[in-house]
Image (cartoon, rainbow, N blue to C red):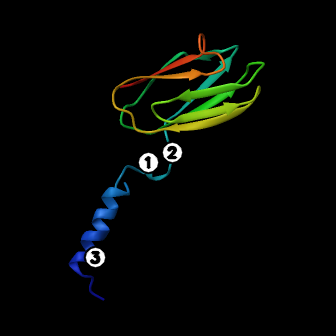
Amino acid sequence: MTRSLPHLLFVAALWLVLGWGMDARAQSGELPSFHIVVADGRFTPARLEVPAGTRIKLTLQNDGPGPLEFENDEMHIEKILAAGGRSFVVLPRMQPGEYSFVDEFNPITGELIVIAK
């Protein structure tokens, strides 16, 4: 059965738009992952360098005695964790620069700076 040219162009466009032509790591769904521990209103590490232009996964672990509200208004990211809780967020592809994330329950001490390079 012969495929029409418009059909082939459509499939090629889907291939590029959906990212099916990416490397094997991206195809497998594996994202660069970073572990963040929050205790007593402080992030460890407090500054984190990540690759620019790549979605990344942040695993959050709340070792503090109270809840944590991990937030970045610009990216519309908000995650609440109970004491002892563990979860993750996936950050979108970021342009090179610095991005601030805060613990809304500890706004003075609870800040994480993500540096996309």
Pick whichever of labels 2 and 3 is earlier in the sequence.
3
Which amino acid lies under the numbered mark 2 shown in the image of this protein? Answer: Glu
What residue type is disc 3 on? Answer: His
Which label sits on residue 98?
Answer: none
Q: Is residue 103 left or right of residue 99?
A: right
Query: What quarter of the picture does the C terminus occupy?
Result: top left
* Closer to us: 46 or 72: 72
Q: Name the residue under label 3.
A: 7
Q: Mark 2 points at which residue?
A: 30
| Residue depth check, mark 2 versus mark 3: number of the one nearer the observer | 3
Element class at badge 1: helix
Query: Disc 2 and disc 1: Cα gap in Å?
Result: 6 Å
Tell me whether circle 2 and circle 1 mark residues in contact (CB < 8 Å).
yes
Q: Distance between the residues labelled 1 and 3?
A: 26 Å
Nearer to us in this view, 70 or 6:
70
Residue drawn at the location 76% of the way across and 25% of the way down: 83
Local packing at callout 1 (Cα closer than 10 Å; few below 14, some 14-19, many 20+) is: some
Calculate the distance from the C-alpha at mark 2 to the C-alpha at mark 3: 30 Å
Vertical relation: 76 (above or below) 111: below
Judge left or right: residue 40 versus residue 89.
right
Quarter-of-image position of residue 92: top left
The quarter of the picture where residue 46 lies is top right
Q: Residue tagged by mark 1?
A: 26
Q: Residue at coordinates 21% horizontally, 77% vertically from top-left? A: 5
Give the residue type that dot 1 points to. Ala
Q: Residue 80: horizontal and vertical position, in percent?
A: 67, 32
Using a 10 Å C-alpha cutoff, classify the residue at mark 3 as few (fewer than 14 neighbours), some (14 to 19) or many (20 or more): few
